[in-house]
Amino acid sequence: MKDFPSRLLRAAVFSCFLIIFSSLLMSMAGCSPSRVTRGGPTPTPSPGNAFVYTANAGGNSISGFTNDGTGALTPIPGSPFAVPGEPFGIAATPNNQFLYVTSFQNNQVDEFLISAASGVITPLACPTVATTDVQPLKIAINPAGTLLYTANQAGSVTGFTINATTGCLTAISTTPTDTVARGITIDQSGLFVYVVTGGGGIDAFSIGPTGALTRLAIGGFDSGSGTMLAVKAVPTFELLMASDGGSTNNLRTFNINTSTGALTPVIATTPGSSPPNPSAIAFNTPLNATTPLFYIANTAANNLTVNTVDATGAIGATSLTVPVATGPIDLAVDPSGKFLYVANNGSSTVSVLNANIIAANATTALISSSPTGGGPESIVVVGHP
């Protein structure tokens, strides 16, 4: 059985009440009559600027959608795509050409080509299986799109090189972490990997010329709580944010030393200041590269935390709480910064929100909701290749 990332989160999720947004969903679904050309057929919406994919561990599938530019999602032909072995983590190359999904049960990464025209994903014909350590969870790809790493629940990180032409993965090595590696991220320089673990710490690694990792003794951090859940580096400056779960449920920010990779703690919010199980973090740097909005999925509370953060690590004075569906477990922003997409594990849906969330629209940011395969664990949004 899976550890905290699925078994305990789901237990917490199903103990909470379902928040229903039927009136909002109905008001945002479809096109208004004013958008229909009189005397002719209704135009077929063309794909917007992004494809959206969820890894559905409970349904052994990947769900794919196109965005019609208004936030409404249309399933990609063939979706959901059958993928065995409990697909868990999901990520795409920066050029939006290749998609990768961890297989929790099969200890491997499955590789796909993304159709630029339709978003349909096709398995790659690679010469070898991309084998990981036991029970891979989340995936991180470096900004150059040349390296991929998986955080493995067994307590390790497995690294691969990405062939720029074929998308196939070639194993580099597996490097030990502290117990139960959960979330994983790479800083904006592409030089350092950070992993949150069940031991309550953040493990830091430098990336060598071949992609091999070296653990940084000076780079680590220990919360003392044993419940670190998520970690994410800001893609436009050297700052790391992590969530501390369990009974504390607070947020932490760290400055990253650009030479050594060492972390300097900046902000630790008051324990209990955020809702339960803050399981994922996303930044809206397309909207604001210097003081981006950040979003945190609070799985057991069925809502999101929204605030701002700057390069010093300071967060805004007031956080907003935004309700979504049951069990929000992962989230991502589209390339334009206009929409926020949330994978809801408990309701097996993806929610679409106005990403520019402020106090005035915090309760009305939800645009639409679409069903996914069973039990989505991760989500990724990619621009058209």
Image (cartoon, rainbow, N blue to C red):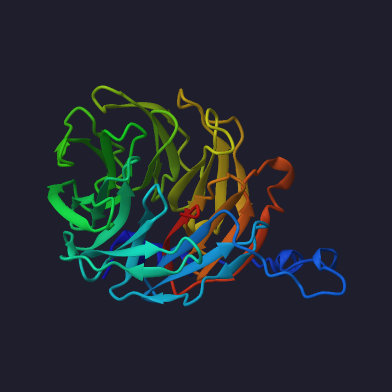
Q: Can residue 282 be seen here?
A: yes
Q: Residue at x 17, y 55 (%)?
A: 170
* Snapshot quadrant of residue 262: top left
- Give percent across and percent down for residue 348: 50, 71
Q: Quadrant of residue 244?
A: top left
Q: Is residue 328 above or below residue 222?
A: below
- Quadrant location of the C terminus in the rendered image: bottom left
Q: Nearest the camera: 289 or 14?
A: 289
Q: Is residue 256 above or below residue 77?
A: above
Q: Up-down: is 29 above or below 288?
A: below
Q: How many marks?
A: 0
Q: Nearer the viewer, residue 151 or 36?
A: 36
Q: What percent of the width, then of the height, locates residue 182?
A: 30, 52
Q: Residue at x 65, y 56 (%)?
A: 69
Viewport quadrant of the N terminus = bottom left
Which quadrant holds residue 41? Answer: bottom right
Residue that appears at 64% across and 43% down: 356
Residue 227 appears in the rendering: no
Residue 166 percent across, percent down from the top left: 27, 58
Q: Tell me: 34 left or right of 181.
A: right
Q: Nearer the viewer, residue 340 or 154?
A: 340
Residue 302: % across, % down = 55, 59
